[in-house]
Image (cartoon, rainbow, N blue to C red):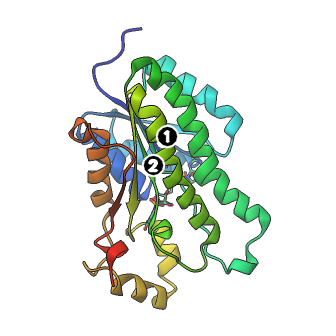
Amino acid sequence: MQTPQHKIAIVTGGGSGIGLAITEKFIQSGIHTIIVGRDQQKLENAKEKLGNRCECIAFDLNDLKAIPQLVKQIVDMHGKIDILVNNAGINLKKEFTEVTDEEFQNILLTNVTAAFVLSREIVKYMIEKESGSIINISSMASQYGIPKVIAYTASKSAIEGMTRAMAVELSPKGIRVNCLAPGFIATDMSAKALNNDPERKGKVLSRTPMGKLGEPAAVADAVLFLASAASNYITGVVLPVDGGNSIGF
Ligand code: NDP
């Protein structure tokens, strides 16, 4: 099969929030973007908005055993995968002592294990091309301590460690691996965590020097940079896109 000239990207959770903004930015840059999420309708709404360069695949990333076949199907169709954005994620805001074993494991399954399995399968193909860029999505929860998000914090700290481990092992094979740590970005996820908790929202804003939540497009601009040749000597970094939240007083 002749490999296409244009880049092929996979954005997990590309049907909403930050993932949708990343997909929009990629498509504007001529990157054919495959979005993966569980909710078919959400994906189709995104495709309707973004057009034919957007392809959607309804798939639950918690189904780890099916991931190799998913990746093979995409490579069979497109001949390659140039960019992977491990953006899909779930949050759980709950008192430390109330979090069950199952809840803790479930957050790690989606936010860490699925990202690992998907990366591993895609890297097998990237190695053949000696080229690729992987961008993981972390959070302020791994820059400093935030109460009531124990499992989410564990998952995002793991993603940052994995980014560095992947970068050292894969960069010699032509694959760059970076991580982006969004601050508080206006999406459904942050609305759930902040909108009925004015004290928490006030705390977030008071330690964000720019004084406001970020727009998903601001994260998307930085992801596009990390995905593109403009960052071709950057690997293993965790880049905050946070209005200064991580260094705020
Ligand atoms: P959203 O809830 O809008 O997006 C999460 C996406 O992940 C959804 O599109 C969802 O799609 C997808 N997803 C969740 N579980 C699965 C699964 N098992 N299989 C496939 N897809 C799945 O939240 P955001 O856009 O805010 O979050 C995107 C990323 O950014 C997350 O990793 C989050 O942790 C991170 N982040 C967000 C911040 C914020 O302030 N908003 C701050 C810091 C980090 P579907 O429901 O269709 O499965």
- Mark 2 in CB contact with mark 1 (< 8 angstroms): no
Camera-nearest residue between 27 and 236: 236
Q: Secondary structure at mark 2?
A: strand
Q: Is residue 226 left or right of residue 56?
A: left
Give the quadrant of residue 238: bottom left
> Under tag 1, what secondary structure?
helix
**Residue 59 position within the rendered picture, expressed as x and y whole percent measured from the top left:** 60, 40
Quarter placement of the N terminus: top left
* Label of residue 166 in the image: 1
155 left or right of 12?
Answer: right
- Mark 2 or mark 1: whose residue is earlier in sequence: 2
| Residue at point 46%, 89% (across, down) | 198
Task: Tell whether 191 sits left or right of 118.
Answer: left
Give the distance between the C-alpha atoms of the residues marked 2 and 1, in whole angstroms: 11 Å
- Residue occupying the point 40% across, 47% down: 46
Please name the amino acid that badge 1 sits on. Answer: Met
